[in-house]
Every structure is written in C-alpha cells, then in structure tokens.
Amino acid sequence: MENIIFSLSTVHLHGSAFYDFLGLRKRFFVDQLGWDIPHDDQVEMDQYDNPLAQYSLVLRDGEVIGGARAMSTEARWGAHTYMLRDAVEGKLTDIPADIMATKVHKKSMWECTRLVMSDDLRTHAERSACLQLIVSGLIEVSAQNGATDLMSLSPLPLMRALRQMGFAAERIGEPYRNDDGRQYAVLSMPAARKPALTPAATHRAQPTAVHAPSVK
C-alpha cells in the first residue's frame, strides 16, 4: 500500500486516482448506504470537492482502495464554507443543525470528510493499515497548512479504531442516528501521530501517472 496526497492543482500527477476515488465513494455512500447526495452512474462528487480541498488516498497495486478529503474551517467557496458549518447554518438538511455547539472558524482546525475504504480489503489487518495511511496523509497535508487539530462527522466506532492506532480521537458532540441506521458524532483529534504506530506516507508526486484506470 502507498499513500498519495494532492489537491486539484496536482491531481493530474496521479492519473485517474481522483476519479476512481469518486467512484469508490459512489459505490459506498450512494449504492450501499443510500445517501441522497450528488452523483451519476459512476461517481459521487459534491460542492466540497473544490480547489480548497486536499485529498489523502491509498493505492494498492495501482488501485484506489481508500481515501478521505480535508479542508480548512476557514474555507469558503461560493455560498459554502465547510460541511459541518454549513450544516449548523441549515444549508444541509440531512445533518442536524445542532450537531456542534458552536461554529469553528480557525486556521488551526481542519475538517475531514468522505472517509471510505474498499470492500476488497477483507481482513482487519488490511483495513487497519489502509486507515492508518489515510489518516497519516490527512495529518500531513493539514499540518503543512497550519492545522493543529482535525475534526470530522464520523460513525462512532471510528473513534475506537483511531485510538487503537495511537491517535487521540475524542467525541466533541452528541451522537445522532442517521437514516442509514448508523450513529454519527463529531470527533476531534490532534493533527499529530505516533511514528511507532503509524506507517509513513509515500506520497511524492511523479511526473507521470502512478495509477492505472480501474476496471470496476
């Protein structure tokens, strides 16, 4: 497995990896969970996939098997800021407006969204390794841009998984049950890692494509 991090300005250095990540998101969030979010027959893509977003993906043998998106809580693109703030302001009807007690707007806090891993990861060890690489990439790219903390609206079991890997995740909001049957809450953790527990990212950009098109 290898980790790549990029924004839309460098997405061309990684072949079809970004498009395949959007496809992985569609298969999970739309096809499996039934979320009512923008998509077509192939991919899912929303208003937060804009030039302010950063991405951390994991590849195995050239195939995207996991990834997530990160954005500063200072971000603003047109009428939108970041997902949780837009929810608090009532712009996203599928997320409770009281999901956070206050709006966060500071350079030191970044929001992570659309965390997904492929069903091709069959074992706990494979999924753990993939998750560590995704989170390591999120930490790296956000810290490079001045972040000291990360937050996300995530399924509750993710907090335990992150803690087992050495990440100091904690719940900072009250949980709620979504229409997909899962419980979610806002989680927060320092943008830091314990090197002994977390694999190093291998995200160096290459001048040619590093990801072959997916046939799925």
Image (cartoon, helix red, strand yellow):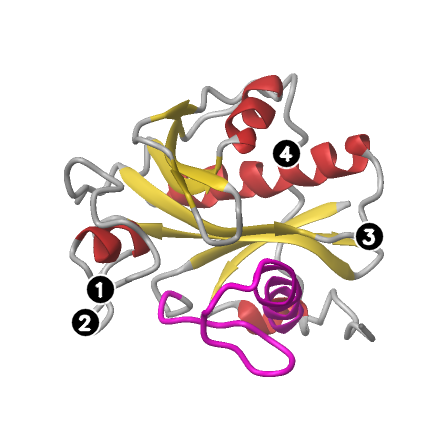
Contact flag, marks 2 and 4 (Cβ < 8 Å): no
**Which residue is identified by label 1?**
91
Q: Quadrant of residue 190?
A: top left
Quarter that holds the N terminus? top right
- Count residues near mark 2 (Cα–Cα under 10 Å), then give few for <14, some for 14-19, many for 20+: few
Looking at numbered disc 3 in the image, what kind of residue is underneath it? Answer: Asp
Q: Is residue 57 visible?
A: no
Q: Earlier in the sequence, mark 2 or mark 4?
A: 2
Q: Image point 31% across, 31% down: which residue?
A: 174
Circle 4 — which element? helix
Q: Position of residue 110 (x, y in %)?
A: 33, 43
Q: Nearer the viewer, mark 3 or mark 4?
A: 3
Q: Which residues are magenta?
A: 19-48
Contact flag, marks 1 and 4 (Cβ < 8 Å): no
Circle 2 — which element? loop
Q: Position of residue 99 (x, y in %)?
A: 27, 41
Quarter that holds the C terminus? bottom right
Q: CA distance from mark 1 to mark 4?
A: 32 Å
Q: Nearer the viewer, residue 26 or 31?
A: 31
Q: Image point 82% across, 52% down: which residue?
A: 120
Q: Earlier in the sequence, mark 3 or mark 4?
A: 3
Q: Earlier in the sequence, mark 1 or mark 4?
A: 1
Q: Nearer the viewer, residue 130 or 32?
A: 32
Q: Earlier in the sequence, mark 1 or mark 3?
A: 1
Residue 7 vertical position relative to residue 192 in the rendered view, above or below: below
Q: CA distance from mark 1 to mark 3?
A: 35 Å
**Residue 118 horizontal side relative to residue 88, left or right:** right
Disc ID at residue 120: 3
Disc ID at residue 79: 2
**Which residue is identified by label 4?**
132
Q: CA distance from mark 3 to mark 2?
A: 37 Å
